[in-house]
Amino acid sequence: MSTVTAHGSTHHEAHGDEHQEHHHHETFITKYVFSQDHKTIAKQFLVTGIIWAIIGGLFSVIFRLQLGNPEATYPFLEDFLGHWAKGGKLQPEFYYALVTMHGTILVFFVLTAGLSGTFANFLIPLQIGARDMASPMLNMLSYWFFFLASVIMMGSLFVQTGPASGGWTVYPPLSALGDASSGSKIGMDLWLVSMAMFVVSSLLGGLNYITTILNMRTKGMSMTRMPLTIWALFFTAVLGVLSFPVLLSGAILLLFDRNLGTSFFLSDIVVAGKIMPNEGGSAILFQHLFWFLGHPEVYIILLPAMGMSSEILSVNSRKPIFGYMAMVGSLFAITILAFLVWAHHMFVTGLNPFLGSVFVLLTLLIAVPSAIKVFNWLTTLWRGNIRFTPGMLFAIGFVSLFISGGLTGIFLGNSALDIHLHDTYFVIAHFHIVMGVASFFGMFAGVYHWYPKMFGRYLNNTLAYIHFWVTIVGAYLIFWPMHYEGLAGMPRRYYDFSNWESFKNFGGLNQFISIIALIVFAAQLMFVINFFYSIWKGRKVTNQNPWGANTLEWTAPIRPGHGNWPGEIPEVHRWPYDYGKDGKEFIPQDVPVGADESKH
Amino acid sequence: MNEFYFIAIVVMIFVVIFQIAKASEYVSVLKGEEKSRKQNNKINGFLLITFLILGLLGAWYCNELYYGKTLFPQGSASVEGEKIDFMLYITIAVTGLVFVITQILLFWFAFKYQEQDGKKAYYFPHNTKLELLWTTVPAIFLTVLVVFGLKYWFKMTNDAPKDAVVVEITGHQFAWDMRYPGTDGKLGKKNYKLYNQPSGNTLAVDFEDPESWDDLHTTEMHLPVNRPVKLVINAMDVIHDVGLSHFRMKMDAVPGIPTTMWFTPQYTTEQMKKRTGNPNFVYEISCDQMCGKGHFSMRGVIVVESEEDYNKWLASQKPEYFTFFPDKDPSKKVLQVTDSASASKPMAQVMPNNP
């Protein structure tokens, strides 16, 4: 499209050069491996996240094979899984290992590190007008701690007793006692050490994001002129910094219980005929520690997707985001409430009923800021002039999924109903839609929208559209019917339902879901091929501002070098959502306010 | 060989789609980017509205297919569960309404306001009245749901009625065990360190406690209909969860921390067979908390029967104490259990390590 610039500012014509002048010399190692450039670090997070997503997705496809066809055998599985798939049949231990690793990988390695790590690193300096992060060194360490965590987690897949297999929530005593499960042997220690490294990584990243946003905004970029992406990434970092240390403490105490004979989480246990000496610990304590991170974690995953979708919806509707201050306020409210609702995961642990009732109230309160966000997104679309770029479609898909999955949260947050629905497929459907698929949609929206800025090339549009349509249709086909399984009380984490009178009549549905899962997974591979192919062979970007957006990153050269802007950092004169104002299609943030311009 | 063909076909499909996609990119460059973008816009706008319509129809069809398979058409098997069903219906009504309205608005707006030549977007950055409207309306709806929810929550988590039948259920990898308090109405003490002393004492019952002498140990749970039941829930090794989906009840079994829950079964197993039209119907206890490799097979059975049948069944069970100390069995008539000297003597022999 032609850039409809509303004015004649000079640096907009200054097209980028791939090999800019740098003030220091860079070797291959410092440029691509131990890089301190936030853009390279962002790409490292993204590529590592994609690799993890393929692995985590593949795991789900393998365990769906078992769920869809519990009677069948797949001799080819034995070829590469060995005794884990004896006779071509997945063994229960390995099934549970796959389920556990699928959750761990997608929640932490893909949707936390892959999502926040990528977009916080990439967008924060570019959108607030900074040359780099506050501490490029810590930023680099953040990636390499993540890498270390990845290597350890990957290593745990290859130990003889198998990786952790007690569910991604690793509740003790199951995860504390090697005698209780083969996955609770060395695989569990590796899981805990890997998570400790992961927490270090996310703390280094989070501190950096907060510091950068608070201190390094360009001239004129007041907090209320920040794009919603930055607000979302800011609150995400705050959540992470305040909650991840609690997981770290839980992980360390669990390591102590496992290896040093302490009894933080253990009491009165007889396992495999052995009477354990541990007394006085509480298994429930771990759940408090875990969910004190675990629930904010849901929002650590979701907020960046919300922020990016807000931005992309506004850009492509050619309209300002509706209710900017309410959007920021609701992000803030969600951030505060995120810390006060963790025990809604524990309604059936024997929790004090009064305490439970407080958590019900606070949990359902989150629906209010969520509703504000949804209606504001809808109003943003209303009377727009909408362009369905792939990024925009994924942002619309995000809103649809957020509505669907958010509403089922109202069932689960109400403790009386949760008694029936807890740990059933209803929960699986709920969190996969609202946290899993919705966040993935936010992430895809972000990748499609900022890919031109990252690599100076476009992704193939046709593949992008196929990817979107297969994914949204597939996601609903997979997860919508699961609500019904949940209403029938079908429990999570079952290897086989065929011996259960109450649950066995969903066999046909399980088979259907498995087939769709396979197709959706194939569509994701298509995306991955598109992603890597386009880095080198995609259509080149010739337009500095291809989407006609207002935010600062589009004032930088097409392929910005280390330092982002070759000359001065642009000064900001307005908020980022002046779309369609005074008859002009868009007015970038660095354009001075005209004398005759109306106020919004 | 089959796998080889399968992989070959998948790879071929990938290559074909990829080539088409590349070709279409060239075509769009030839046609002019602006023109092909507008064409794509029209196609996707149409697909979005189609997706909405087919999606809503699909949701309805899914309901037709699967609602009958959920437990709701047959009703709750417990009196208290009916409240949960009622809550569910209110919540479905409220959220269903919001779901349909917001999804229609989302896709309809996207379709209706797709880019058109010469059209300008409406500059509409905020409107306080609208924002207050959609802050307060959801808040009111949620208040209603919270009030109902908490009312039932407190009722269900309150103490069980005094006349409740007490049954202890203990989870261990990977089965359930029940204990009935016997004629004295009291369960004997347990101490996990007494596990397997004497050999076979899998529930670690303290047989020095006279209250344990008449306790029954069973693997199947029998309950009388229309009487409140209080379950005392234990775990030996890891966390389990007593899931009673027909009764809409669920509670974790945590080692070291006993939990309880209570409910009133209102249909016998036989009645449920008729209600569901399934001659194989059985009340099942599912373990709903991941507990290891056999988690999926940790199945228990509850038989709900008339008070009369229940009492008959109770009478047919022998206290566990007599299994370990057959010499105390009055039916075999040897010693009087009230004689403290003779009662404690065998205990000291079987539990040499007991402090």
Image: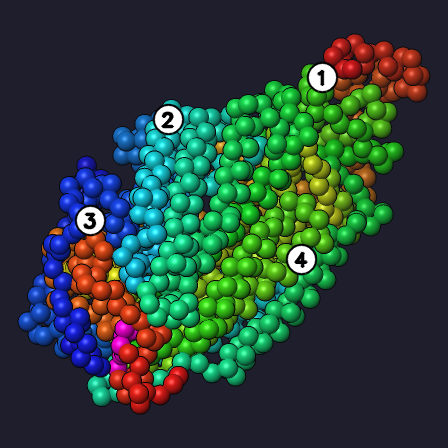
Outermost residue toward the left? B30
CA distance separating discs 2 and 4: 43 Å
Amino acid under disc 2:
Val
Helix, strand or loop for disc 3: helix
At x 52%, y 84%, the residue is B129
**Which subunit holds the residue at mark 1?**
B
Dots 2, 4 in contact, CB < 8 A: no
Give the label, 3 or 4, closer to the camera.
4
What predominant SS class does the magenta segment belong to? loop
Is residue A210 magenta-colored? no
Q: Which residue is mark 2?
A: A159
Q: Which residue is mark 4?
A: A358
Q: Position of residue A481 (x, y in %)?
A: 45, 58
Q: Foreground mark, 1 or 4? A: 4
Nearest to the eye among marks 1 and 3: give it. Answer: 1
Q: Is residue A124 left or right of residue A480?
A: left
What residue does disc 1 label?
A: B197
Q: Is residue A442 left or right of residue B250?
A: left
Which of label 2 and label 4 is nearer to you?
4
Question: What separation in Å lies between label 2 and label 3 (alpha carbons)?
Answer: 32 Å
- The residue that appears at 15% across and 77% down in the rendered structure is A2
